[in-house]
Amino acid sequence: MEQDDMQAFAAEVRAFLDAHAAKAPDPAALTWGEGDDSMAYFSAEPPEAERLRVDEARQWQRTRYENGFGWITGPAQYGGRELTPVHDMLYDAIESAYEVPDTGTIGVVGLGMIGPTILAHAQPHLKDRWLPAMYSGDAIACQLFSEPGAGSDLAGLETRAVRDGDGWILNGQKVWTSVAQHSQIGVALTRTDPDAPKHRGITAFLVPMDTPGVEVRPLRQMTGGADFNEVFLTDVRIPDDHRLGEVHGGWTVALTTLMNERATVGNEGAGPASAALSPDRLAALMRATWTWDDRALRGRLAELLADAMATDHLNARAMRKLRAGVAPGPEMSVSKLMYGQNLTKAAHFISDVLGPRLIADTGQWGTYAWSELLLATPALRILGGTEEIMKNILAERVLGLPKDPAIDSRSPFRELRNGGTR
Ligand SMILES: Cc1cc2nc3c(=O)[nH]c(=O)nc-3n(C[C@H](O)[C@H](O)[C@H](O)COP(=O)(O)OP(=O)(O)OC[C@H]3O[C@@H](n4cnc5c(N)ncnc54)[C@H](O)[C@@H]3O)c2cc1C
């Protein structure tokens, strides 16, 4: 019965995609020297080209939404289909064989993390206003969490919100805010009670990004683009009905976002990792650079591919748990850790295969292009929780090792300088 349901859904997805998109070339049929050799993870385009790309992504999201695939797991009330995460994954798997615009700008943070947070914690008028807008591609949302002094130790955030009649006045600085330059809304964590322990004095707000006092400044990356921003909040007035969750209850709201971040980041890591670790592409690269006969390199390639397969199986296990209605456990942290480590090993391997061709563009197809991915690798080891934080989670929750002493979680925030972790 369940199998029939999945087959019917898959047929529906294929019919939709056949009608609206072209089939992508089979990656296994890679012909060295033909087609686009870009391996970029972050954009490095001029602003006009980036705007065009975002418009295409919005348009494609609208097409999905109008055809019942914009929010596969979401409530019907907001345009969702009320299907399972497995239907969602099946859709993604089928769509990956078609040439469609990259909707990462809209999807990763906004639809993957902020949408579920608004659904769980916002007042009805905000859900009505923003959820259909987001899932139909009209509105983009960003995550205003990290600050210069609060990343892994997110609960150490210092942006203040102070009561002002029927609203709040926000002051502070956020950093690393992906897609803020394209966003209509953001979810901000603020400190509302500095006398409470750090996790208990936080309140979350939905911030319309056109509110006076919100200033978005791009951060230029070493890959050339500017995907992240600093966001300065100066006397930003937010009505109380834009609060998410309870006053001082923002940590619960943050946990909803972070739980969804871990799940999204698992998939996030999979994209660039599978592009980098495609056996066909790596074997073709070795042949093109005359390194195929190097037995030591071939051994490292085999090791890389074995690790990538193990990671994929681990992810598949988490997906099977989801299918059975069980929340995935620490395997999400292991696969996040593994994707980062696999990519790092791949980066070293590719550097050894390419040598100077990685840093000087000789014009040879499929060589210098790797530099775009390699420069993005460190970011993929940080976003969604650094490798050290993933290791801490595994040490404590899987291996049962003692927790770090966290006296800072009990003391009033005002008395702290630096603290514990997310
Ligand atoms: C690509 C990318 C996109 C991002 N997008 C967003 C976004 O949209 N919105 C947003 O709010 N944030 C975003 N971030 C920020 C991200 O969440 C933080 O960078 C991350 O949580 C780490 O925080 P930090 O940079 O302050 O590093 P820190 O927390 O200062 O860590 C510095 C180093 O210390 C280590 N460390 C810290 N604490 C411990 C500990 N307890 N035990 C062992 N080691 C520790 C870390 O592992 C790291 O190596 C993004 C980051 C990246 C790379």
Image: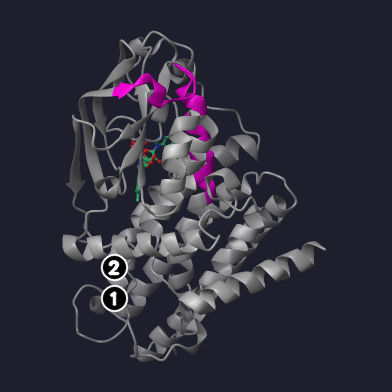
Callout 1 crowding tier (Cα within 10 Å): few <14, some 14–19, many ≥20? many
Q: Amino acid at mark 1?
A: Ala
Identity of the residue drawn at 40% across and 90% down: 287
Q: Which mark is residue 372?
A: 2
Question: Do residues under tags 2 and 1 come within 8 Å of each other at their CB atoms?
Answer: yes
On the rendered structure, is 120 left or right of 357? Answer: right
Q: Secondary structure at mark 2?
A: helix
Q: Which residue is mark 1?
A: 369
Q: Amino acid at mark 2?
A: Glu
Q: Main secondary structure of the magenta part?
A: helix
Identity of the residue drawn at 41% across and 65% down: 60
Quick check: is 47 in the magenta stretch? no
- Disc 2 C-beta below 8 A from ligand 1: no
Q: Secondary structure at mark 1?
A: loop
On the rendered structure, is 293 left or right of 303? Answer: left
Q: Which mark is residue 131?
A: none
- Please tell me whether residue 375 is drawn above or below residue 400 in the rendered image: below
Q: CA distance from mark 2 to mark 1?
A: 6 Å
Magenta residues, start to end = 238-263
- Please tell me whether residue 121 is drawn above or below residue 316 in the rendered image: above
